[in-house]
Image (cartoon, rainbow, N blue to C red):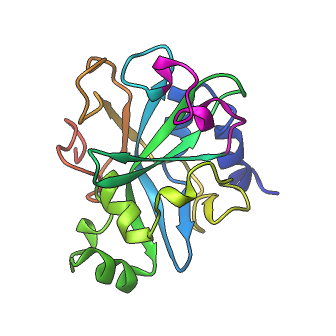
Amino acid sequence: MTATAERHLRALELPVVDAAQALVGCTIAHGDTSGVIVETEAYHEIEPACHAFVGLTPRTTPLFEAPGLAYVYRSYGIHALLNVVVEPEGVGAAVLIRALEPLAGADLMRERRGRERLTELCSGPGKLTQALAIGLDLDATPLLGGPIALGPPPPGRSDPPPLVAGPRVGITRAVELPWRFCAAGSRYVSRPWPRGLLA
């Protein structure tokens, strides 16, 4: 296995903030659709914006299991959101996948999303799960060899992209933590764009 291919595997074992950065540039695939991760957010049991902050419950069980699982939950009763469980078993930590740059299956994504512009297909955590048809039934499934596949960067993108960091969005607690990471220069990330994104 090449160093590039190993990068996404090593990311699962890193502290969650480091993992959130390392996963930018890797790929997510489901069925005939896939994309390059261009935006992530880190969540850890020590801070109240993380679901694991309340401890072990039926809902949060996947967060405390071995790294490499998908944690999929419904936000505001509408959108399924995809997270990558990281850190050692027993620690509640996950990386929210906030945005993708479409890689394969763009026409299918357009059909599912009812949008034409490529930059609007996966530019948000609820948009990307709709585009890739990722639902709650895929919660707690493995991301290595499972129906949702976490993979290495695509050919020609072996170098980690430069990142722009900023506060997480859509939360009301621990809003001061700069745990949102975006690929600098990418127009596929979600709004609001962090300061300096397209510099």
Q: Is residue 50 left or right of residue 140?
A: left
Q: Residue furthest right?
A: 1
Q: Say whether residue 57 is magenta.
A: yes
Q: In front here: 87 or 22? A: 87
Count of numbered tags: 0
Q: Quadrant of residue 178?
A: top left
Residue drawn 36% across and 66% down? 130
Picture coordinates of residue 141, whole percent (x, y): 65, 54
Q: Nearer the viewer, residue 55 or 50?
A: 55
Q: Quadrant of the C terminus?
A: top left
Q: Position of residue 35 (x, y in %)?
A: 46, 66
Residue 136 image position (x, y, % from top left): 48, 56
Residue drawn at x 58%, y 23% is 56
Q: Could you say which is closer to the camera, residue 106 or residue 74?
A: 74
At 25% from the left and 51% from the top, the residue drawn is: 190
| 7 inside magenta stretch | no
Which quadrant of the structure image shows residue 96?
top left
Residue at 27% over, 74% down: 113
Residue, far top:
46
| Span of residues in magenta | 52-68
Name above or below for residue 68 compared with residue 33: above
Residue lying at the far front in this picture: please name it.
58
Residue 126 lies left or right of residue 57; in this view the side is: left
